[in-house]
Amino acid sequence: MSLATDNKLIKWIDYRLPIFSMAQHSLIDYPTPKNLNYWWNFGSLAGICLVIQIVTGIVLAMHYTPHVDLAFNSVEHIMRDVNYGWLIRYVHANGASMFFVVVYIHIFRGLYFGSYQAPREILWFLGVVILLLMIATAFMGYVLPWGQMSFWGATVITNLFSAFPLVGEPIVTWLWGGFAVDNALLNRFFSLHYLLPFVLVGVVMLHLVALHQHGSNNPLGIDRQGPQDSIPFHPYYTVKDMVGLAVFLLVFALFVFYAPNLLGHADNYIPANPLVTPAHIVPEWYFLPFYAILRAVPDKLGGVLLMFAAIGILLLLPWLDTSKVRSARFRPVYKWFFWVLVADCVILLVAGGKPPEGFWLIMSRVATAYYFIHFIVLLPFIGWFETPLPQPTSITQAVLKPAQEKA
Amino acid sequence: MATGSSTKGGADNVVRRDFLTIAAGALSAVGAAAAVWPFIAQMNPSADVLALSSTEIDISKIQPGQNVTVLWRGKPVFIRHRTPDEIAKAQADDGAALPDPQKDSARVKKPEWLITLGVCTHLGCIPLAFQGDFGGFFCPCHGSHYDTSGRIRRGPAPTNLPVPQYAFLSDTQVRIG
């Protein structure tokens, strides 16, 4: 497709460095299924979240000091003295939560509409890699303010690696650069917390290359038959994304300006003390389901392995789902089990925030078991036994049908 | 690589060039590994961290029934002056069903002094002394109960509280590390 401009300078540059034709190809002309609904907003929203985190993070790094004696005070300095420091830090801290909300919705969108199925398996893998990088980055970022939750979160999570026989202890000492969580760890976490978002950008680029190879999946889950099933990305989806972005920013602003600490823990405003563990330590809300799985298992190594497996199992998803039909709209049985899985994850999230005893320990065990049963047992069997509903022959047919019925 | 390598080859077609290719490749791999190693090893404890490997403590002020936490290599160490009751309980439980069986006598040098790392063997929180179902230590993070010998009795922790290297320099001085 040729460049839609008469501007001589743009043409001169584009002839030598085709950035304008690339932008036109993948942001403007890019043919997109004409039936995408608002659940398809969350991919671009996630990209915007990443940009917000990088911009605010770079600014925070200009005022932050990664040293055990100075880190906590430098964060307070940002909050009290730096011009708009409070705003930038609250945007960054709440931005992490927003990023996870958006990405979790994005993932469940993929689960509902079968976006991981052929030929989008590698697109899905790259998404799992992005999730892992996000988890690592968010965890290391939470350590930087060097409050009580920072310190003990770092202690508990790095100790996870001690569960592995033989290599466990040397790995933990290596991660710490000492015999306890101390300055060496804070320093390297700062370094890596600055690096990983840019690695994320790289993987996101690959995610987009894989996406643009076969284009977006769509709510019907059927392949496009031809150009009549597509519309150009701009202006149709740029505008739709803007609508979603406006709503998203409203919610974001609500947290930043009216409840900036709602999602945090008061204990993290106490400077780190290596001699006192807070009575009730829990991770940030977006890690609670994984934390529930960790604690559900009465064995240290077992808990750690199962927690990693909870994400690892997503890599097998394209093969565990035996259905020939992508979208849950045409899968009368799977549709219900999808919502049971959502409820299961919510239960894990709640259970992860409760002390691991009594009712909630039992709940987290049941929910953990169900999580794995869903992927390993239910998904393959539903795919084999379910009779899918008839699918429309094309996107255009499905889109125009309601209009014709009305007419 | 393989093209044109048949001129001077033996019956199995291996020529001098193949040897050179493999040898050069292997040497580069060793060189690359050697170059990577400093970047991995730099994360291990540095010399100044290793230098702080022992600590001396005056224990004369610690009363029976008192537990004191000191810092050794950045880690808390419990020094517990056990009461005769606690000692008797610890020794009586030698035969109990222990997840990590160890006799009390193997964990102390003098029965009245229990010296262990104050780090839960589960995920590294600091247990609270005199709490839990066995009167020893209790970790609030994930609910591990230790007895008066610092042995794990119930909960997710896999092993007993480790006993660091230590020596009584005199009746009132102990050196840890």
Image (tube, rainbow, N blue to C red):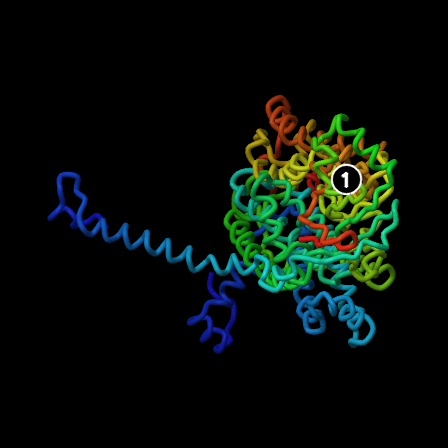
Q: Nearer the viewer, residue A301 or A80?
A: A301
Q: Nearer the viewer, residue A395 or B144?
A: B144
Vertical order, A327 against A283 (above or below): above
Q: Nearer the viewer, residue B96 or A215?
A: B96
Question: Tag 1, which secondary structure?
Answer: loop
Split into 4 quadrants, where in the image is the C terminus of chain A?
top right
Q: Position of residue B3 (x, y in %)?
A: 19, 49
Q: Is residue A393 left or right of residue B21?
A: right
**Image quarter of residue A28:** bottom right
Residue at image mark 1: B150
| Residue at 66%, 51% in the rendered image | A135
Q: Is residue A347 left or right of residue A395?
A: right
Report crowding for label 1: few under 14, some 14 to 19, many 20 or more residues within 10 A (C-alpha).
many
Count of numbered circles on the image: 1
| Residue at 80%, 36% in the rendered image | B147
Q: Chain of mark 1?
A: B
Q: From this viewpoint, is residue A386 visible?
A: yes
Q: Position of residue A243 (x, y in %)?
A: 73, 58
Q: Position of residue B110 (x, y in %)?
A: 76, 42
Q: Amino acid at mark 1?
A: Gly
For this orientation, the residue located farthest to the top is A385
Q: Position of residue A270 (x, y in %)?
A: 83, 60
